[in-house]
Image: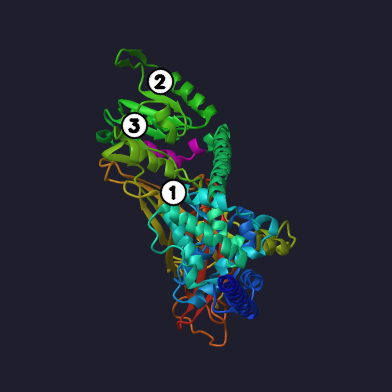
Amino acid sequence: METKAATPKLEEEEEEEEEEEEIEGWDAWQSDEDNSIAEFLCLFCSLRFDSTETLFNHCSSDHAFDFHGIVRDLGLKFYGSFKLINYVRSQVVKNKCWSCGLTFECSKDLQNHLHAAVSYEKGGKFLWEDDVYLKPFMADDPLLHSFAADEDDEDYNVLIDKEELMRELVSNEDFGELCNDSQEILKDSSSELNIVQNIGNKQDHAENMACHFDKMKTNGILMEENFRPFHQRRKDKQLRFSVANVTAREIKDVNENYFGAYGSFGIHREMLSDKVRMDAYRGALLKNPCLMNQATVLDVGCGTGILSLFAAQAGASRVIAVEASAKMASVATQIVKDNGLLSEGTEKGDEKQCLGKIKVVRCMVEELDQHIQVPPHSIDVLVSEWMGYCLLYESMLSSVLYARDHWLKPGGAILPDTATIFVAGFGRGGTSIPFWENVYGFNMSCVGKEVVEDASRVPIVDIVDDQDIITASAVLQSFDLATMKPDDMDFTASFELKLRSDFQGDSTASTLGIWCYGIVLWFETGFTSRFCKEMPTVLSTSPYSPGTHWSQTILTFREPIVMQSDKSIPNLAASVGTEGRPAVRIRSRISIVRSSAHRSIDISMETTGISSDGQKCSWPVQIFNL
């Protein structure tokens, strides 16, 4: 009896000793962990920091990346913040700007380029939206397990219930993905905590995870913020729906304001009075009878209906005129009716008796199917005057491409069918400086200098005299509307500018060089012989052509660059782009992307001056929003 009684007592004492040893061992491991210095690698350079706070302060001050500001402004939760970090690391390793997408030859060039983001979205989604960024880009990245610690306890102190965990794990469709995530969290903790090996049954797997969850939570291995990706999945999904609803409301508001603005007759008078515009469209429609005879035409954004009237006059059998502005749709209907061309069809069984050729439909073209039945790929000619300032402002081109893909016949005509953006450098006369230097005999040049400084931050839409263009022109980007995709509207292109061979200089030009104050952009759209075989034409907004209501778009340098011909002899002690060492070429890279603000565009411009001896000087990137 005594022996039998002593045996369990001895076992109890041994178990207690083992538990004490385990606790002491764990405390020692935990103490070592606490005393070690976690090195957090900067997102952009090779510097390391002992806390996330100092790391993010460094990123904000040295790399224009305010992590906490972005998280706060965008309302990012754990998942979104986690993906943002991995996204930035994945871009930096490719020497690519995380916000504007420009790629550089080396990390140093990228460091010099980094700037505060103008937009965090592309195509209506965050740049880091892809779930591929849920996978850590850098192995054993301590930042991914620590960045949430800086947030308020109220936001991240999530109470986790074992039964809730069980229900969540068993019911979760992405159970396998959660297991993989758990391996990422636990793989460096302890081999005995590997809970996802050789478990065949899903319920057993969940129970096993929950059991170890209790042990890990007690020991402090699994912190609430580390568990957050599981627990937060449903809330993040609800957040995405919430953000989507907010975005949809914002887009709706912008669209209503945009189409409402086109309810002003002043805008339409300006466009109808634009002779260059009207002659190009009228010529394309009326002077190409082989294209228009008995054609079914879709007019996207018809306004007053003038292009639809031209199409009917040219011999089209049916014209569908789509207009989203309620007021202008009503006005267009009345105009078409007053000219005896309104289709006021009456239904007779399957037949439709049309009294005219033109049907005006009030809606956005993306909603056309909800208002009228148009068979897919049944349109012969798609016509639209979609162009905005700098060609792409207003982002109406995406609607035209939508109509092309849904209703245009294979081989059908799209008018216009090409578009090209051009650039050139402009001189002092393209600024307001000369005006302020002599205002009724008084010198107000201090105002001119401030205006130029402001212009370096905001694009200006204005007429530039061809005499103020000091460089040869260059093509920035060309589009083929018959084949392009919507994403092609976002692009980056490089070009070089040299002084015009026929430039005579202005009153301020000197033997030391000519001052280039910035870049002017304009566009041309082509009604080419591909579709307009009898009479192709071009609509140009060039400074060398008669003026249009589009004018030109002006991007002003922060500081002007002195240019001279290749014959110039540089002063090697002077900086490139100054009178002592003029630039013989200006190399620039411009990116134009659709802005997060619906129907706007963001423009970034990088500029480098190159002297006759090949030396270069680069200026900081400039960001514009139009």
- Measure how far apart labels 2 and 3 are at the Cα level: 14 Å
Q: CA distance from mark 1 to mark 3?
A: 48 Å
Determine whether the residue tagged by mark 3 lies in a helix, strand or loop: strand
Q: Position of residue 522 (x, y in %)?
A: 47, 54
Is residue 607 visible to the viewer in this orientation of the structure?
Answer: yes
Residue 528 lies, in percent from the top left, at 30, 46
Pick out the residue farthest to the bottom.
573
Going by the numbered disc 3, the residue's amino acid type is Val
Badge 3: residue crowd in 10 Å (few <14, some 14–19, many ≥20): many
- Is residue 282 highlighted in magenta? yes
Q: Residue 173 got which mark?
A: 1
Q: Which mark is residue 297?
A: 3
Sort mark 1 into few (<14), some (14-19) or many (20+) by Cα contacts within 10 Å. Answer: few
**Magenta segment:** 271-283
Q: Nearer the viewer, residue 112 or 608?
A: 112
Tag 2–tag 1 contact (CB < 8 Å) = no
Regarding mark 1 in the picture, which secondary structure is present there?
loop
Q: Point out which mark residue 342 bears.
A: 2
Locate residue 491, reporting x and y percent. 43, 58
Q: Are marks 1 and 3 in contact (CB under 8 Å)?
A: no
